[in-house]
Image: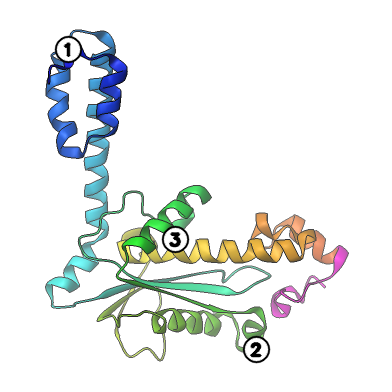
Amino acid sequence: MDYSKLSIEEIKDIISNADLEERNRLIGLLENDNRKGVKRLSERLRKEIIGHNKEIARIKKLKEYEYKYISKGAKYIAGVDEVGRGPLAGAVYACAVIMPIEAIIEGIDDSKKLSPEKRERLSLEIKENAISYGIGYVDEKQIDRVNILNATYMAMKKAIDNLYVRPTVVLVDAIRIPNVNIFQVPIIKGDSISFSIAAASIVAKVERDNYMNRLHNEFPVYNFSKNKGYGTQEHIDAIKKYGPCPYHRKSFIKNIV
């Protein structure tokens, strides 16, 4: 195809529909076009490809633990993470996810580093690509009965039990889960350095945020859709003014009420 005879808008359409291999080929062809607009397109395309290649390298580095245990014979590796240990209200959530070792999902990182919109998009992509994922949660009443650490263990175990495929290895963010008879690897700051744990952290965060949004519809005075149950000043002031709702953790708010 003679790209010199195409308009810039036509070239933009071709680029937008091209795969990575085709985009690499296009760069060389477009660089020979003397039109300034085409040269700008070519330069932008080159930067995008460089950025894409850097992201692929970052994702592969995040898979060092996964590659290690696959090379040792593990068939299925699950990443496990939790969210919601600190809030004054609502359940603690956990996710376990088994991703194909070849899966590349750009943007995956510790959920705390991502915007809500990006977490939502990535959570859907993770679920679509996962070999299996499981969600576990323990509500505020159980948290008050057994304490938050034990409730966290329970939520993580439930998440693993809800996998359709039994993992060979479980990568866990920082802790070892009691009563789980699977080889576990606790990884400090695992949600930042393990692809599987980061994926689990994203899904767990989205699931719990959606749950807190539902609680907000029931008790809007606490603004759960914004604070997600955490102890912001606005939330504490609302508890003092209106008293706690049934979803508040009594063991967490005893000094407030």
> In this image, 65 relative to 29: left or right?
right
Magenta-drawn segment: 241-257
- Residue pictured at 50% horizontal, 48% vertical: 117
Q: Which of marks 2 and 3 is nearer the N terminus?
A: 2
Residue 71: % across, % down: 12, 71
Element carrying mark 3: helix
Residue on which disc 3 sits: 202
On the rendered structure, is 66 left or right of 71?
A: right
- Can residue 229 be seen in this snapshot? no
The earlier-in-sequence mark between 1 and 3 is 1
Q: Residues at badges 1 and 2 in contact (C-beta under 8 Å)?
A: no
Numbered badge on residue 237: none
Q: Distance between the Cα atoms at labels 1 and 3?
A: 45 Å
CB-based contact (under 8 Å), mark 2 and mark 3:
no
Pointer 1 or 2: first along the chain: 1
Circle 2 SS class: helix
**Label 3: how many Cα within 10 Å (few below 14, some 14–19, many 20+):** many
Across and down, in percent, residue 139 comes to 62, 79
Residue 67 percent across, percent down from the top left? 18, 66
User: Quick one: which residue is furthest to the right in this view?
Assistant: 241
Say which residue appears at 18% left-offset and 8% top-offset. Answer: 34
Question: x, y percentage for residue 79?
Answer: 34, 71
Res. 50 image quadrant? top left
Residue at position x 65%, y 88% in the image? 145
Q: In this view, does 125 lie to the left or right of 248?
A: left
Eyeballing the image, is 154 above or below 249? below
Q: Of 56 and 135, which appears nearest the observer?
A: 135
Q: Residues within 10 Å of mark 2 (few under 14, many from 20)?
A: few
Quadrant occupied by the N terminus: top left
Residue that label 1 marks: 4
